[in-house]
Amino acid sequence: MKEIHNYINGKFIPPALDNWIDNYKPSTGEVYGRIPNSTTEDIELAYTAAKNAYPDWSNTTLQQRSEILSRIATLINEKTDELALAESIDNGKPLSLAKSVDIPRGASNFQFFAHAITQFASEAHESSGLDAINFTLRQPIGVVGCISPWNLPLYLFTWKIAPALAAGNTVVAKPSEITPMTAFLFGEICTSAGLPKGVLNIVHGLGTSAGEAIIQHPDIKAISFTGGTKTGAHIAKIAAPTFKKLSLELGGKNPNLIFADCDYDKMLNTTLRSSFANQGQICLCGSRIFIERSIYDQFKSDFVEKTKALKIGDPLAPETNLGALVSKPHLEKVKSYIDKAKEEGGTILCGGEYVTVEGHENGYYLQPTIIEVNSTQCSVMQEEIFGPVVTITPFDNDEQALSMANDVRYGLSSTIWTNNLNRSMYLAKHIHAGIVWINTWMMRDLRTPFGGIKNSGVGREGGFEALRFFTEPKNVCIQY
Ligand code: NAD
């Protein structure tokens, strides 16, 4: 049994009220450890440690801060194998994916913000005719809260913490209770890298207890949250009366628009990834696929063939393409959408069933599933499923494709496959999404703004956007 403790003031400690939650291994369905279910008492301890660490940390030189963040990045890289194994066991994702994507990206998040903070600058405005100059201070906020989801555990945890620390804040952070392991291991890395005690505090527990205690804390003045849209709305409601700064990165239902003039093979291989990578549990996965009618039949048959060839199995096996879904309730939720699609007139082209993996009979496995639907007004087209389930639908012209793509309450990312420059420019301008990929998917430059519109969230992460979020601008006007 692996027992996880909170990381508060540089020490690993059990929860104040001796409350615990089971930690499950999705590949086998077994309980393999327990984690604190932290309560207000633990959050208060974490807050106090962060508050005490703030004066010194916010006064470190940029070079000192940058060096510590860089050391954290180096240590994540050095521990790639250990962290990737822990991530794969905790989350059910293929080990190969954790090794090639999740953990390297955790390191890059820290390396990136170690550099970015040395380049961050503020503005000055000369007021002509008034003999005055204004300049803007960008000061850290104080103690901030970072709350992350289970799908890319270390990747998204570090994506918030790195800019928060780089900007000079101290942090109370909570990973998902479903995937706490790499956040736990990350505490040790911070200590080894020389991060002063109390600068980062990691508390574990349920959203409704530990998470909500962070949101409700009157002196935690900013919250960076990534998770579901429903949770985001709830958090916004609680946070509003305390005037906290909020960054909300929420759900998606991302469209893929595929035109006949695209590079077909590149599109097909990338679409397979954008549909089923991480068992479809990436907020950027393209779960609604629209295809120009002239290539629809060809695409349908090639896509189904490639999907059927994907190997579902033990996340630790090198040949595995799809591992286990993250939890039993999530597996059942995803499956219920497939059943609903059938009731609503969708045609299951492949997949749709649970999978029993030899030696892992109680694991949470599901076949990658393609559903053909002809209306945007069905549950599988309107609601985020967040699993290995995509829809395919033909379209006849650009306007129809655009209108179907936009006919949803989400607006996180979108992918367009075409070699027609005018079309891609027109669609990029009119599509409802915070991120548009043209002839690629999930290609990330960490300097760019990241986030969604509509029900996909409020605010942007990434690059200077994140550093702006984690600082308060203060204008100073001097007349001379
Ligand atoms: P979730 O909303 O259930 O939980 C996310 C985090 O919030 C967890 O740490 C959870 O413990 C915590 N939480 C839950 N209720 C809370 C409350 N009342 N107060 C404070 N904290 C609370 O989401 P999830 O199921 O972990 O993650 C999946 C969702 O995350 C999907 O909707 C997915 O699209 C979204 N997501 C979005 C992005 C993005 O960048 N937009 C990235 C990854 C995942």
Image (cartoon, rainbow, N blue to C red):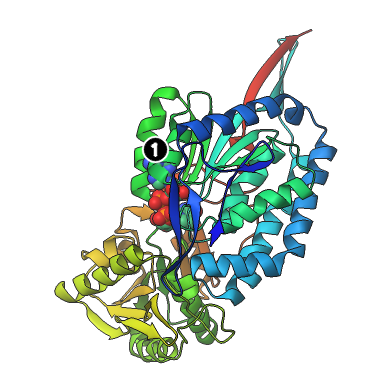
Q: Is residue 50 left or right of residue 237?
A: right
Answer yes or no: disc 1 within 8 Å of ligand 1: yes
Please name the residue shown 75% across and 51% down the image. 72
Q: Does residue 275 sit above or below 158 in this rendering? A: below
Q: In the image, is 148 to the left or to the right of 473?
A: left
Where residue 420 sits: x, y (%)? Answer: 51, 73
Horizontal side, residue 79 vs residue 63: left or right: left
Q: Residue at x 39, y 38 (%)?
A: 235
Residue drawn at (72%, 36%) of the image: 197
Q: Nearer the viewer, residue 153 or 225?
A: 153
The one nearer the camera, 179 or 367, is 179
Query: Exactly how many numbered labels are in the figure?
Result: 1
Residues 271 and 283: in front is 283
Residue 150 in picture, x, y percent from top left:
48, 58
Per the image, label 1 sits on a secondary structure element best described as helix
* Residue 250 can be seen, yes or no: no
Q: Nearer the viewer, residue 156 or 314?
A: 314
Q: Quadrant of the rendered structure where residue 260 is?
A: bottom left
Percent x, y for residue 175?
Answer: 52, 50
- Position of residue 207 measured from the top left corner of the image (x, y, whole percent): 41, 45
Residue at the spot of label 1: 235
One can see residue 306 in this view:
yes
When asked about the image quadrant of residue 8, the answer is: top right
Q: In which quadrant will I find the C terminus?
A: top right
* Mark 1 surroundings within 10 Å by alpha-carbon count, few (fewer than 14), some (14 through 19), many (20 or more): some
Seen in the picture, residue 27 relative to 59 is either above or below; the reply is: below
> In the figure, 195 relative to 253: above or below?
above
The disc labelled 1 sits on which kind of residue?
Answer: Ile
- Residue at x-position 66% and y-position 19%: 475
